[in-house]
Amino acid sequence: MAFIPYSRQQVDDDDIAAVTAVLRSEFLTQGPQQPLFEAEFAAAHGVAHAVAVSNATVALHLACLAMGVGPGSRVWTSPNSFLASANCALYCGAQVDFVDIDAHTRNMSASALAHKLEQAEREGTLPQVVIPVDFAGLPADLREMRALADRYGFRILEDASHATGARYLGLPVGSAWADASVFSFHAVKIVTTAEGGMVTTQDPALAERVRLLRSHGMVREAAQMEQVPEGPWVYEQQALGYNARMTELQAALGRSQLRRLPQMHAHREALAERYDGLLAALPLRRPARRADRLSSWHLYAVEIDAARCAVPRARVFQALRDAQIGVNVHYIPIHTQPYYRRLGFRPGQFPAAEAYYAQALSLPLFPMLSDGEQDHVVATLAKALQA
C-alpha cells in the first residue's frame, strides 16, 4: 500500500480553476479576491469582521499587537500547542506563561486557569491576554473562560487554527466568547490556501487595527489620514506594521475550498466516528467528544494507555512508519523546548500536558482517506500495540 500521511490537502478542479483565473487576471495581490474571501469566511463563521493575512503565526502576532500586548504584558497559553501560540507574545516583547490542560479534552483546563488567576491576582501578576487553543479542532471551554475574563479583566485570543468550521454551544467558532479568534489555512488544515491565516472579531476597532498592521501600518484613504493629503498619491504610515498580506492566489483558493467546507467536515466526522468504533477494543484513549460542541476533526489524536499496554510509544510509532503510515505526534509541550527552558521553564511544571505528550499519536485523518486505508492503519496499530 502507498504511503498514508497523517494529513493531506484536498485540491480539486474547481480550486485549480479559481487559481488559474487569478493568474490570468489583472491582480496577483491586493485585488478583489481577498476582501471577498474575508466576507465569505465571516459569513460562514457568524462574525462581523474577518481579516486575512499571510499565515496563522502572523495572525496571532498581529492580534496580540492589536490587543495592546507589548513589553511588560503577560500572556498565558496552553503548553499543548504548536510553538506559534506562545511565540506570538514573545514577538511583542511580552512575558509568556502556560496553563495546564484538561487530561480528557487536551485543551486548556478552565479550572486550572481559575486557580492560576486567583494566585496571580494575589501576586499582582494577572495576564493581559489568554490564548486558549482548540486542540485538534475541539473548541475549548470558552464560556467558562469568558466569565473569568470578565472577572479578571483579560482579553481572550482564541487560537482556532485547528477549528475552521467547528461549533460551540450552537454557534460557529470565532463568532462569540473570544475577543478575537485566529484560523490557519496551512496545507494540512481544514481549508487551505497553502499558507494563510485569518483573524475574526466582533470588534470593529480591533479588526481595523489588524488591517493597519498587516500592511506596513499604512493608510491610503484620506478620511483615515492625520494630515490633509495634497493629492491622491499620498499615503501615511501611522504605526510600525508588517507586510502580512494574503495574495489573490491564496484568497481565490481559500474561497473555492470554503465552498466545500460542509462536505469536507462531514467526511472528517465520518472517519472519526469510524475510528471510534474500530479502536474501541484497543488499549488507547480516544479523542474526547462533548455534546455541547462539534469538533472540526483536524486531528485524530490517541494516547496509548500505559496501564493496559507496555509497548513504548516510540516502538509503536516506528512500526507504523515502517508500514508506510505517516503517524505524527502533536505536540511536544512548548515549555520543554530548549528555548523556553532558557526562559526558566522546566519539565514537571505542567504535568497533564506532559503526560498526554508521552503517549500521544496522531493517526491519519483527511477527507480522501479510504475505508481500506483506515482499516490498514487500525490493523497495523493493533499489531504494534501487541508487540
Image (spheres, helix red, strand yellow):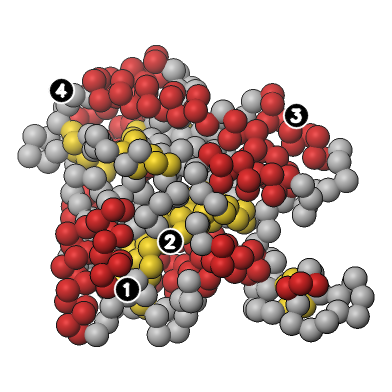
Foreground of the two, 178 or 384: 178
Count neighbours of disc 3 (C-alpha within 10 A) and say few if under 14, some if 14 to 19, many if 20 or more: some
Give the x, y percent position of residue 270.
37, 22
Disc nearest the viewer among 4 and 3:
3
Foreground of the two, 8 or 99: 99
The quarter holding residue 378 reads top left
Report the residue marked by disc 4: 281
Count neighbours of disc 2 (C-alpha within 10 A) and say few if under 14, some if 14 to 19, many if 20 or more: many
Q: Residue at x 86, y 75 (%)?
A: 234
Q: Residue furthest left?
A: 307
Disc nearest the viewer among 1 and 3:
1
Count neighbours of disc 4 (C-alpha within 10 A) and say few if under 14, some if 14 to 19, many if 20 or more: few
Q: Is residue 224 left or right of residue 6?
A: right
CA gap, disc 4 and disc 3:
45 Å
Report the residue marked by disc 1: 153
Q: Quadrant of the C terminus?
A: top left
Give the x, y percent position of residue 79.
30, 60
C-beta proximity under 8 Å, tags 4 and 3: no
SS class, disc 2: loop
C-beta proximity under 8 Å, tags 1 and 4: no
Q: Amino acid at mark 2?
A: Asp
Whichever of labels 4 and 3 marks the residue nearer the N terminus, that label is 3
Report the residue marked by disc 3: 17
Q: Is residue 197 left or right of residue 314?
A: right
Q: Residue at x 65, y 79 (%)?
A: 239
The quarter holding residue 372 reads top left
Report the residue marked by disc 2: 179
